[in-house]
Amino acid sequence: MTGRFDHLPNRRAIVDRRLLAEQVAAIDGTEIADLRRQIGVLLKAALEAGRAEIARRLLANPSRGIEAANAQAYLVDQLLRVLADVTTQRLYPLANPTTGERLLLIAVGGYGRGEMAPFSDVDIGFITPGKQTPWAEQAIESMLYTLWDLGLKIGHSSRSLDEMVRQAKGDVTVRTALLEGRYVWGDEALYADASRRFHEDVRRGTERQFAADKLAERNARHIRMGDTRYVVEPNVKEGKGGLRDLHALFWIGKYTYQVQRSNELVAVGLFTREEYRLFQRADNFLWAVRCHLHLIAGRGEDRLTFDYQREIAQRMHYADRPGKPAVERFMQFYFLQVRTVGSLTGLFLAHMDERFSRRRRLGLKLARTPRKLDGFAVDGGRIALPCDDFFQQDPRRLVEIFALAAEQGMEIHPLALRCATRDARLVTSVRRDARANARFIDLLSGGHDPELPLRWMNETGVLGRFVPDWARIVAQMQFDMYHHYTVDEHTTRALGLLARMEHGALADDHPLPSEVMGQIVSRRVLYVAVLLHDIAKGRGGDHSILGAEVAERLCPRFGLTAAETETVAWLVRHHLLMSATAFRRDLTDFKTILDFTEVVQSPERLRLLLVLTVVDIRAVGPGTWNGWKGQLLADLYDRAEEVLRLGHKQKGRGERVLAKQEALRTAMQWGADTLAAYVRRLPEPYWIAEPDDVLAHNAAFVTQAGEVQLAIDAQVYPERGATLVTVYAADHPGLFSRIAGAIHVAGGNIIDARIHTTRDGMALDNFLVQNPLGQPFDEAGQLMRLKTAIEDALAGRGKLTDRLKAKPLPRARADAFRIEPNVLIDNKASNRFTVVEVAARDRPALLNQLAYALFLSKVTIHSAHVATYGERAVDVFYLTDLTGDKIASTSRVRALEKRLLAAAAGVPAEEAG
């Protein structure tokens, strides 16, 4: 019952219980309500002072997480003891208590373990020998009201001994809370009774079921939290590899072996001393992070979001390094700790499995001999080691075991993984060994799914030792809102997606890449390129260029030919080219296609680049892929493939226009005169820019509109994964900026826009719009809201700027990121247009402000292409001056750049000048 907090230095500076008890005893008065109020004032002051002292200590020693967590529990203990004494001795005294009028107060859950964050719930239990007496009920109620008045979040229960046993038997959550039960105050004999009954009546004989229940509970929690340790905004408590996983290990160990402290797990053989040291380091670090998080948030907050990460990194004294800011270094260490938790969990469960399976085998005369597999043993369907020094005998086996797991589709025994972790350093001696490298390439591209074996290889540290460049991206996070995972986890997922695509599992989601995958000759080039595409992140500089240099060095070692090495390096160097071209450029501008194919040069490289691009985007995280991106990549692939196959012998521009017009006549069932009249109204660029289905939609819409001055249509466009909004209106300056603002007010994001003006002065503008989740607006009410917002904006009903200011930023956490606005003006990217690219932090009405700046600059917008990468937006405009020429004047280019930079930074147009 004592000694748990003896290690805390100068405990009286946190709270002096004797002094506090004397202050409480000195309170005058007999009215219970007044006494309770005065007691509450003293306890509140002690609570605040104690919290402030603990926070001060944590700031002075920011890595002492367990000490801070213990101090919080110690503080609450002392307050509860003072409160319980005064409640039972002064507020509700008993002159002659009976044996039934005994009361026990225990700490349960995390508080029972003696570990609490600053704003953790206080979980307590009141236990009575039998049915609760009126006196006990009064005392308990009074204590609870006082604790609530202190602002504490109390989780409480009141049970008799029999009720405690019955509920613990029936509910694993109650059983777990009571497992951590710790004496705080009250009848010590009753506590001894409760402990004995819990162990004899509840625990005994249920160890195996308890372990199974806790593991099922853990698995369900992991699925709920995203089922990966490497999400970039992790939950410190509930996430995979977080504190709750460490607690689950201790609970299972305590329940099975009746240990009281985590260091006793070594004595019962569940951990080695080195593994316990890792356990303790992870536990201490995670508690430090959680305590800092609570203090910064000022409440019980366990999600380590971007807006807290930077401040915690600063509090914990992480510093910037070349190419890696402090926040990324802090998060990298965080992910290394949760990886440790994962490894320890596997080992721990292997021991538990061995304990329970050994019990099942008792009574058998002969033990089954594990069968052999290429020298390895097979134990329970898992690849195991025949002896403890198996890797030491031949370090190539450290690669072989993971390749074998991929080929056979088998798991690796956790004890074999423990040996791999222990012996990982030995693999450095076979880095240049031809057989070891050949087996590694077999693991990657042998036709089996490499994702899980590669993850095991990574988590044991073997992969980082075998490929030192990989070690530099292990647990490397990217401090932005676009990437959901660490770099190594992203890459591992991309390889898994690639394998599934090759086996046809993604054909419904990605028909073109799945088809193209079957045509690729250079399979192992593709797998190695996916492995290395982000290998140089976090080094400072362009990771594509640096990564290509790494590929040129590594591929020969892997056994790739000179030609394969050149292709891998090219893919790594240009792995962002296809997405940048598809998402930020006008694919109807033929020069865009020519510039792209000039870099690609061969159909095989085009196929490789398409598949690499798709798995790269898909592996970024949930919600980053949508039909619109797929269609843009398919359009670029088809047009580039045609150029690479036929060279420049395409149909001429005039022939293409005539072909589209004839297709429209057929679709609309028009006569020659009707088509000719319609064609006379529209400029040639319109026919080039729009696909056949949009041309037909526009023609039907314009015909139906007749002579009206404003018509708006909104309909789902499933082929593009978006909503097509068409506006037919009398053209006037600033029309595009008003429409863009109205669409945002209605909750839409413009991802593509094409702006046309008929020869008789009407604007015919087509917008592709998605909701904030990257999906089309598809409900009738949503479509009507879009149309109404545009009508109101163009009719001047309500001030658009005020409505835009009132629209909140969809992701307030974007404030955690510093993104300097940037404007690039390129007169070489297109033969007909000036191409302007604006990068800025995404925010409400960014496109509206940029469009208004272009209106003030007296330029004509022909198309707009919008891409967002988390908190970063990249908006691209194809422009001419009012006479239809490129913007060539140096002074006009500088003025345009200045105005767009101001708009990107959020400076109002009137201030920008």
Image (spheres, rainbow, N blue to C red):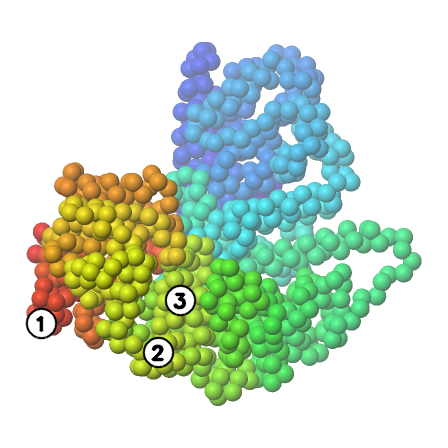
The location of residue 23, given as percent across then percent down, is: 44, 24
Residue occupying the point 42% across, 19% down: 37
Does residue 241 lie above or below 455 as drawn? above
Per the model, the C-alpha gap separating discs 3 and 2 is 14 Å
Per the model, the C-alpha gap separating discs 1 and 2 is 33 Å
Q: Tell me, for residue 101, which label it has, or none.
A: none
Q: Which residue is mark 1?
A: 889
Residue type for callout 1: Ser
In the image shown, does 719 or 136 lie closer to the viewer? 719
Residue occupying the point 55% across, 38% down: 111
Q: Does the CB distance between marks 3 and 2 fall below 8 Å?
A: no
Per the model, the C-alpha gap separating discs 1 and 3 is 36 Å
Locate the C terminus by quadrant. Answer: bottom left
Residue 323 can be seen in this image: no
Q: Count residues near mark 2 (Cα–Cα under 10 Å), then give few for <14, some for 14-19, many for 20+.
A: many
Closer to viewer: mark 1 or mark 3: 3
Closer to viewer: mark 1 or mark 2: 2
The location of residue 288, given as percent across then percent down, is: 47, 50
The location of residue 525, given as percent across then percent down, is: 50, 78
Q: Which residue is mark 3?
A: 634
Q: Which residue is mark 2?
A: 643
